[in-house]
Image (cartoon, rainbow, N blue to C red):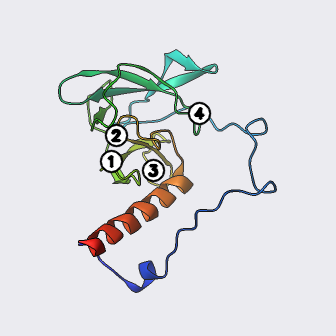
Amino acid sequence: MARKDGTRSKLHVAKKHPTAATRVRKDDVTVVLTQAFCVTGHNLIKPGVQFQGFDGIHLLVSDGKTEGLVVVSPIHGDRSKSGVTFKKGAKLEIMCPDCRTPLPRLCRCSCGKGGWLRTLYLTPDLSDAHQAAVCDIWGCPRSRVIDSNEILSEFIEAELSEEEDAEEE
């Protein structure tokens, strides 16, 4: 059962859409990862498969039966990927293609399918302050590169969902 405390009970997640004044237009800003590291320090962004002219993030992915390389877009919010495919909803192990070390769990994904956000470090020193994450459920609508602000939102939303599920039981 999830722990309840005074701070969390005062926390509310608002699902508001951006206004015209706060919306960032795609034509104005594109955020692209230029480096992403596994926990042992290998850079996962490699030449080869490109997305809109940018090198992709290379991941070794397995569902327990099939294993192969998946290259995901380094562009913030872009769900494009290439390589091996899996059945929608498959729970995956996501690893570094160089050392086969699994990407560490960051927090539950709020997709509601039991997924975990897996950590990609954005600096060679593997700082927790500079991370991105991908969901380990194939076809998760949230399965994309996200930044630290969205990771916080995912963590809060997933924690609140787990508390609601526990209260219903």
Q: Which residue is mark 2?
A: 137
Pointer 1 local density, CA inside 10 Å: few below 14, some 14–19, many at least 20: many
Q: Marks 1 and 2: CB-CB under 8 Å?
A: yes
Q: How far apart are the two marked residues, 4 and 3, measured between alpha carbons?
A: 21 Å
Q: How far apart are the two marked residues, 4 and 2, measured between alpha carbons?
A: 19 Å
Q: Which residue is mark 4?
A: 75
Q: Is residue 109 above or below residue 64?
A: below
Residue 65 placement, left or right of 18:
left
**Residue at (32, 40) in percent of width and height:** 103
Q: Is residue 22 above or below residue 12?
A: above
Q: Which residue is mark 1?
A: 115
Percent position of residue 39, x then y: 34, 40
State whether residue 2 appears in this view: no
User: Which is nearer the N-term, disc 4 or disc 3?
Assistant: 4
User: Quadrant location of the C terminus?
Assistant: bottom left
**Residue at (59, 38) in percent of width and height:** 76
Q: What is the three-letter code of the residue carrying label 1?
A: Gly
Give residue 127's mark. 3
User: Which is nearer the N-term, disc 1 or disc 3?
Assistant: 1
Q: How far apart are the two marked residues, 1 and 4, measured between alpha carbons?
A: 21 Å
Q: How far apart are the two marked residues, 1 and 3, measured between alpha carbons?
A: 23 Å
Q: What is the three-letter code of the residue carrying label 2?
A: Ile
**Residue at (31, 26) in percent of width and height:** 86
